[in-house]
Structure formats: structure tokens, C-alpha cells
Image (cartoon, rainbow, N blue to C red):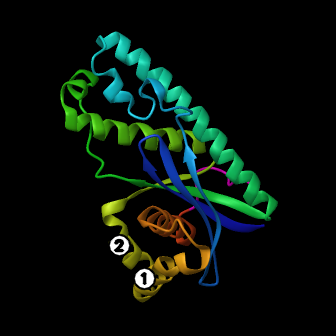
């Protein structure tokens, strides 16, 4: 089977997902979709830490645990649907590349709930982790790619071809149509990094 990789750029409550193949220097966009992982916008589902900030600490812990289970389940459903589509096209999923923020270590929940900027940071970690765990639970190797390092990592991996590869990806919007924003472009580049890696996945590819 041919190899494909998934790239995801995460937002609060959803992720922009792109599935890509890379064969002989040729890039193909196999699937694009917005994957919602909240199921609802009620009850603080899209901003769980904001919703938990006025709760007692024990209640906040329980609320966030339940919210994560919901997000994980929804992410698993979305990932599984994409796997089915790719398998139907005779592709094997080599892994999923998830774009990450700076990687700042979060403090205790009590401190997070007391500082508004940390609420946003924690929610970013929350939804990225929901996607990562969803992939891992289905045996998909996960590569976490720091978005701020994306350009330099591409140069290291592709060398002189990095600029040309990035240009190709940026211009895909002309052929695949909207949406083709930073979400889809960077998710695609992250997936290409995974496909071009010589490091063997820790988990068996799905397909």
C-alpha cells in the first residue's frame, strides 16, 4: 500500500486536518476536513478551562476530566473516519503530525485557573492532547512538530528543496480550492516532515 500522513493544526474545540501523500517528490492532498471534538458549544465545551475557573478545585478537576473524555471520543471518531477514507484509496497511514505551540510547561491546575492567559495555554494543550491520544489509541504514530520551528525543520529535512516544497504547498489552494489557509498549509508541511523522516514509527502504521 502507498503511504500517507495526517497533519493537524488545532484550535479550541476543533482541528484543521489534512491527509497527504509524498511519492517521488510529488505531493498529493488526499483529504481535508474540519474535525470538531466538542460535540457541542454548550457548557463550555470549546473553552473548558474558562468554564472551570469559577468551580471548586475538585469540581474543576472532574469537569475537565469529563470534557477531555468527550473530546477524545470525538477526536477518535474523526480520525477513524479519515483512516477509512484513506484505506479506501489504498493508502496506509504512516502517522499523524500535530502542530504544537512553544511547549511551555503548565503549572498546577489551581494556578492555571487563577491566571487568564494560562487558561488559553492550557486549552491549547488540552485539545492537542485529545487528538494525540485519539491517534495513539488507534495505533497511529504521533509526531509533535513545534510550529515556530517549522521553517527551520523543513530546511534541515529538505535542504535546497525546502523553499520549493513550501511554495508548492502554498499554491495548492489554486487547485484544491478553499479553505486553504495557514491551517491547511502548515498541517500539510508537518505531514510532509513525517513522511520524509527516516525515523521508524514507534507504532505499527494503520492500513
Helix, strand or loop for disc 1:
helix
Q: Is residue 106 shown above or below 206?
A: above
Residue 206 colored in magenta in the image: yes
- Residue found at x 50% / y 83%: 168
Residue 61 colored in magenta in the image: no
Instruction: Provide residue 131's location: percent of width, then percent of height.
Output: 52, 43
Q: Is residue 171 shown above or below 103?
A: below
> Does residue 172 appear anywhere in the picture?
no
Check the picture and name the quadrant holding the N terminus: bottom right
Distance between the Cα atoms at labels 1 and 2? 8 Å
Q: Is residue 20 shown above or below 136?
A: below
Whichever of callouts 1 and 2 sits on the residue coming sooner in the sequence is: 2
Query: Which residues make up the magenta segment?
Result: 200-207
> Does residue 16 appear anywhere in the picture?
yes
Q: Are marks 1 and 2 in contact (CB under 8 Å)?
A: yes
Q: Which residue is mark 1?
A: 162
Report whether 59 appears left or right of 130: left
Query: Observer-nearest residue: 138 or 16?
Result: 16
- Residue found at x 26% / y 40%: 105
Q: Which residue is mark 2?
A: 151
Q: How many marks?
A: 2
Amino acid at each position: 500500500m502507498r503511504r500517507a500522513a495526517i497533519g493537524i493544526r488545532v484550535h479550541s474545540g476543533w482541528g484543521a486536518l489534512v491527509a497527504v501523500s509524498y511519492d517521488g517528490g510529488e505531493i498529493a492532498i488526499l483529504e481535508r476536513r474540519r474535525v470538531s471534538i466538542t460535540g457541542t458549544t454548550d457548557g463550555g465545551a470549546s473553552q473548558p478551562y474558562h468554564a472551570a475557573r469559577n468551580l471548586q478545585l475538585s469540581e474543576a478537576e472532574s469537569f475537565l476530566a469529563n470534557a477531555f473524555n468527550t473530546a477524545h471520543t470525538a477526536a477518535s471518531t474523526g480520525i477513524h473516519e479519515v483512516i477509512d477514507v484513506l484505506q479506501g484509496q489504498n493508502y496506509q497511514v504512516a502517522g499523524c503530525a500535530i502542530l504544537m505551540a512553544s511547549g511551555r510547561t503548565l503549572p498546577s491546575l489551581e494556578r492555571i485557573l487563577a491566571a487568564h492567559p494560562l487558561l488559553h495555554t492550557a486549552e491549547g494543550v488540552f485539545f492537542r492532547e485529545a487528538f494525540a491520544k485519539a491517534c495513539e489509541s488507534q495505533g497511529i504514530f504521533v509526531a509533535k512538530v513545534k510550529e515556530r520551528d517549522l521553517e527551520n525543520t523543513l530546511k534541515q529535512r529538505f535542504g535546497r528543496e525546502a523553499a520549493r516544497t513550501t511554495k508548492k504547498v502554498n499554491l495548492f489552494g489554486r487547485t484544491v480550492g478553499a479553505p486553504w489557509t495557514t491551517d491547511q498549509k502548515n498541517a500539510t508541511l508537518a505531514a510532509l516532515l513525517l513522511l520524509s523522516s527516516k525515523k521508524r514509527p514507534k507504532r505499527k502504521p494503520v492500513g
